């Protein structure tokens, strides 16, 4: 199994420790034996016996310590449920690597958020890399997971969007040096494993149908164990696939270039949502005096399936996706905005239905 330098701690450090301790014991034994050779009587016998014993201890340590270490790593502890407080305490003490793989995390819900983010900040300050991989709220798997939890009245996409909104705000609040070590991505795949890793240890579980994964037994494993290797490989597989993941920056906003006739006018970032395969942007900051087209830099997965030249079209109640639903998704993703939004749909060139926006015509919240 391939191991990355940042993913799993290797055995080299522990092997060096074994050889250093064994070497120190052998050195002490040699000193005792030399002293016994130069001495006479009782002292010579004592040093000779002690030196021989230390030699045996050194050999035993070098031989058996790796075996004991392997046995320790293979040991799995079972917890009845996810212990939020214990994980946050471990997260705060982490100094190398923190990884979270989940649909969404209860650690960012209201009652837990401040304590969790303070622990993340502390881990980043100690030099740890923090990587979070959450389910894409717009993907089919998020809808399916929501259907599985329907009886518990949990809106899975909404929970994920709230997590990502808080992470985006937290990331903006960090100093540049810390911000670079906080990496957040969303993935488009069927969720199979829940992972909460702190340095060389991790809690793992699976996603039961109709139940929250936090309320089922959790396995605490060493990341060098077979269990650890399995979840490490799954995380690396998702993290390293550009067609299956988006980083937080690309999820959060898109870049649009306003065009008039055949000329580019201005390029600027814009809030956006994708609903039923259609893309909507918030154009509240724009002052449009007439028909415009845009060239949009959509997220990579969407860009492969959609053209890049669009007309700006006002959504209407008769559209496939109601205006109210689009506005609600903007609020879920970015939070409510004072003064409302000017929501326009990106219509592929040639599919314009004639609803060209006038100057500052709002639609939505």
Image (cartoon, rainbow, N blue to C red):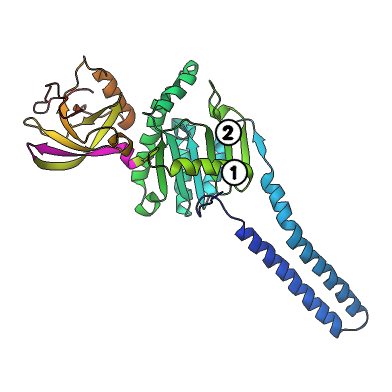
Up the image or down, 309 lies above or below 50; here it is above
Is residue 186 or residue 237 the one in the foreground? 237
Asked if the stretch drawn in magenta spans residue 259, the answer is: yes
Q: Quadrant of residue 321?
A: top left
Residue 117 seen in render: no
* Disc 2 to disc 1, C-alpha distance: 12 Å
Asked if the stretch drawn in magenta spans residue 333, the answer is: no
Q: Residues within 10 Å of mark 1 (few under 14, many from 20)?
A: many
Q: Residue at x 6, y 36 (%)?
A: 261
Query: Residue farthest to the top?
Result: 318
Query: Residue farthest to the right?
Result: 41
Q: Secondary structure at mark 1?
A: helix
| Left or right for 188, reference 2 | left
Up the image or down, 239 lies above or below 26; here it is above
Q: Earlier in the sequence, mark 2 or mark 1?
A: 2
Residue 101, image x, y percentages = 49, 38
Is residue 213 or residue 178 the one in the foreground? 213
Is residue 154 or residue 190 the one in the foreground? 190
Up the image or down, 12 lies above or below 178; here it is below
Residue 259, image x, y percentages = 11, 38
Is residue 62 or residue 237 the one in the foreground? 237
Residue 174, image x, y percentages = 37, 48
Q: Residue at x 29, y 36 (%)?
A: 304
Q: Residue at x 59, y 43 (%)?
A: 228
> Which residue has dot 2 on it?
205
| Left or right for 308, reference 98 | left
> Which stretch appears magenta?
249-262
| Left or right for 358, reference 93 | left
Residue 183 seen in render: yes
> Which residue has dot 1 on it?
228
Q: Secondary structure at mark 2?
A: strand
Residue 158, image x, y percentages = 39, 26
């Amino acid at each position: 199994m391939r191991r990355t330098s940042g993913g799993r701690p290797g055995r080299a450090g522990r092997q060096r420790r074994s050889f250093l301790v064994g070497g120190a014991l052998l050195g002490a034994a040699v000193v005792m034996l030399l002293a016994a050779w130069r001495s006479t009587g009782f002292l010579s016998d004592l040093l000779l016996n002690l030196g021989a014993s230390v030699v045996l201890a050194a050999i035993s340590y070098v031989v058996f310590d790796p075996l004991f270490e392997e046995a320790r790593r293979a040991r799995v502890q079972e917890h009845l449920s996810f212990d939020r407080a214990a994980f946050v305490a471990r997260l705060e003490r982490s100094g190398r690597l923190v990884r979270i793989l989940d649909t969404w995390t209860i650690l960012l819900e209201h009652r837990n958020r401040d304590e969790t983010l303070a622990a993340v900040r502390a881990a980043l300050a100690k030099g740890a890399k923090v990587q979070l991989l959450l389910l894409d709220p717009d993907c089919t798997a998020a809808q399916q997971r929501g259907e599985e939890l329907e009886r518990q009245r949990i809106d899975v996409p909404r929970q994920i969007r709230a997590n990502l909104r808080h992470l985006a705000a937290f990331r903006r609040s960090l100093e540049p040096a810390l911000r670079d070590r906080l990496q957040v991505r969303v993935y488009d795949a069927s969720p199979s494993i829940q992972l909460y890793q702190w340095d060389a240890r991790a809690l793992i579980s699976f996603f039961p149908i109709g139940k929250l994964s936090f309320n089922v037994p959790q396995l605490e494993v060493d990341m060098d164990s077979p269990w650890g290797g399995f979840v490490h490989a799954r995380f690396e597989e998702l993290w390293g696939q550009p067609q299956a993941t988006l980083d937080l920056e690309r999820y959060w906003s898109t870049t649009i270039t306003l065009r008039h006739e055949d000329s580019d006018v201005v390029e600027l970032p814009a809030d956006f949502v994708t609903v039923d395969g259609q893309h909507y942007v918030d154009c509240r900051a724009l002052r449009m005096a007439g028909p415009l087209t845009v060239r949009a830099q959509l997220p990579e997965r969407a860009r492969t399936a959609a053209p890049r030249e669009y007309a700006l079209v006002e959504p209407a109640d008769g559209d496939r996706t109601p205006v109210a639903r689009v506005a609600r998704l903007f609020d879920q993703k970015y939070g409510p905005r004072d003064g409302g939004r000017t929501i326009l749909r990106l219509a592929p060139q040639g599919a314009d239905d004639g609803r060209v926006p006038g100057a500052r015509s709002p639609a939505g919240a």
